[in-house]
């Protein structure tokens, strides 16, 4: 029941935002979908979602100033209580820390650690592991 034009507009925006995130993920070589079963998501994504949920509930969620409506956004595993736009997300990459040991992850991959990306709805979840914590055999 979505006869309300305003709701339809929001739906359209969300659908467009989802396409943007899909494109970004495809560029990063990640496949994901809107029907991702959160229960089946990797533990780090579930931890991130849980922390975000708590922050929303207690009003401590920080949102980057560029997010003014439904649009693709990102959450970094090391700061799950802060929602950022994709531009801020990209800019932060050089200063990110390893999700496992907290050490600076360094420059973007391949030189500076391994980044995992997973899309949940229009939110892109990301974590970075430094080279010493990232093992090729680690399923995440
Ligand atoms: Zn921003
Ligand atoms: Zn590390």
Image (tube, grey):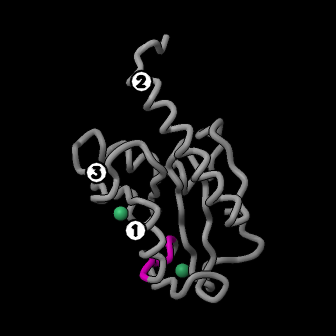
Residue position marked by numbered label 1 in the rendering: 88
**Dominant secondary structure, magenta:** loop
Q: Secondary structure at mark 2?
A: helix
- Reply above or below: 52 against 131: above
**Front position in the image: 82 or 69:** 69
Magenta region: 95-99
Q: Residues within 10 Å of mark 2 (few under 14, many from 20)?
A: few
Contact flag, marks 1 and 3 (Cβ < 8 Å): no
Q: Earlier in the sequence, mark 3 or mark 2?
A: 2
- Reply above or below: 55 against 96: above
For the point 45% across and 54% down, the residue is 73
For the point 43% across and 32% down, the residue is 10
- Reply above or below: 95 against 138: below
Which disc is residue 7 wearing?
2
Q: Secondary structure at mark 3?
A: loop
**Front position in the image: 73 or 15:** 15
Percent from the top left, x then y, of residue 33?
67, 43
Percent from the top left, x then y, of residue 135?
70, 77
Q: Secondary structure at mark 1?
A: helix
Give the image quadrant in which the ligand numbered 2 is located: bottom right
Residue position marked by numbered label 3 in the rendering: 61
Contact flag, marks 3 and 2 (Cβ < 8 Å): no
Q: Is residue 81 left or right of residue 12?
A: left
Q: Residues within 10 Å of mark 1 (few under 14, many from 20)?
A: some
């Amino acid at each position: 029941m979505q006869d309300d034009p305003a709701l339809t507009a929001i739906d359209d925006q969300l659908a467009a935002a989802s396409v943007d995130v899909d494109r970004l993920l495809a560029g990063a070589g990640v496949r994901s979908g809107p029907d991702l079963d959160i229960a089946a998501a990797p533990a780090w994504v579930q931890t991130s979602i849980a922390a975000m949920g708590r922050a929303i509930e207690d009003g401590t969620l920080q949102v980057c100033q560029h997010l003014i409506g439904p649009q693709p956004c990102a959450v970094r595993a090391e700061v799950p209580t802060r929602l950022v736009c994709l531009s801020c997300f990209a800019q932060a990459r050089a200063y990110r820390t390893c999700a496992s040991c907290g050490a600076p992850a360094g420059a973007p991959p391949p030189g500076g650690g391994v980044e995992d990306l997973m899309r949940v709805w229009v939110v892109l979840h990301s974590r970075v592991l430094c080279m010493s914590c990232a093992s090729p055999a680690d399923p995440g």
